[in-house]
Amino acid sequence: MQHVKIPQDRIGVLIGEGGETMREIERRAEVRLDIDSETGSVRIEKVGDPIVGLKGPDIVKAIGRGFAPEDALTLLEDDLMMFDVIDVKAASRNKSDLRRNKGRLIGEDGRTRELMEELSGASVVVYGSTLSMIGQPEQVDTVREAAEMILDGAPHGSVYSFLERRHNEMKHKGMEYHQRTD
């Protein structure tokens, strides 16, 4: 059994209309959710396959960090899918620095966040004082590195070049893999 706390404004998303989302998570992740709407505390109990149930807390955390339920449920697609969070607040000196860092991570009209997503293949959400990602390890590592570059003050152009390079490397690896198996 595990406890996860999510923001108040994400509880409705976790429950879904008429409890639909909660039931879907319980069914697919083989867990039982006990949600305290007052505190945002969610108790997660494994009721089926313990390996599948391990993903339950991450699905709840991902929804709590701003992912749509269908995106959070992609964690169940294969064993390699993972969820990771960067605490932007910890990398910021004060509130105005936090605002600036979030703005740099999102980019003008959301372009930086979109490029991180497109070029890494991971899903990326900036919510509250965090940047969260869902993807395979190499995809998540790519987003994490790009985000850390931005938080360290690297120019966006350098970060975009890094993302392009990693994208091409991952594409090349994927092509090599397909060539060997054909």
Image: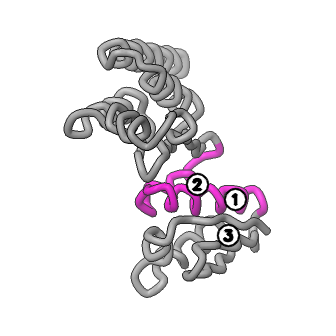
Q: Quadrant of residue 113?
A: top left
**Mark 3 or mark 2, which has the lower sequence index?**
3
Circles 1, 3 touching at the beta carbon (< 8 Å): yes
Q: CA distance from mark 1 to mark 3?
A: 7 Å
Relative depth, front residue between 106 and 129: 129
Q: CA distance from mark 3 to mark 2?
A: 11 Å
- Give the labeled residue for mark 1: 52
Magenta residues (range): 50-79
Query: Residue 94 placed where, x, y %?
Result: 48, 39
Label 1 sits on what residue type? Val
- Compared to residue 161, the image places residue 80 above or below, namely below
Q: Is residue 155 left or right of residue 76?
A: left
- Give the labeled residue for mark 2: 76
Residue farthest to the bottom, as pictured? 18
Q: Residue at x 45, y 37 (%)?
A: 122
Q: CA distance from mark 2 to mark 1?
A: 7 Å
- Compared to residue 134, the image places residue 171 above or below, namely above
Q: Is residue 148 visible?
A: yes
**Disc 3, SS:** loop
Q: Residues within 10 Å of mark 2 (few under 14, many from 20)?
A: some
Q: Residue at x 42, y 19 (%)?
A: 153
Label 2 sits on what residue type? Leu
Q: Main secondary structure of the magenta part?
A: helix
- Give the labeled residue for mark 3: 30
Image mark for residue 75:
none
Label 3 sits on what residue type? Glu
Q: Is residue 134 magenta?
A: no
Is the N terminus in the top left, top right, bottom left or bottom right quadrant?
A: bottom right
Q: Residue at x 54, y 21 (%)?
A: 181
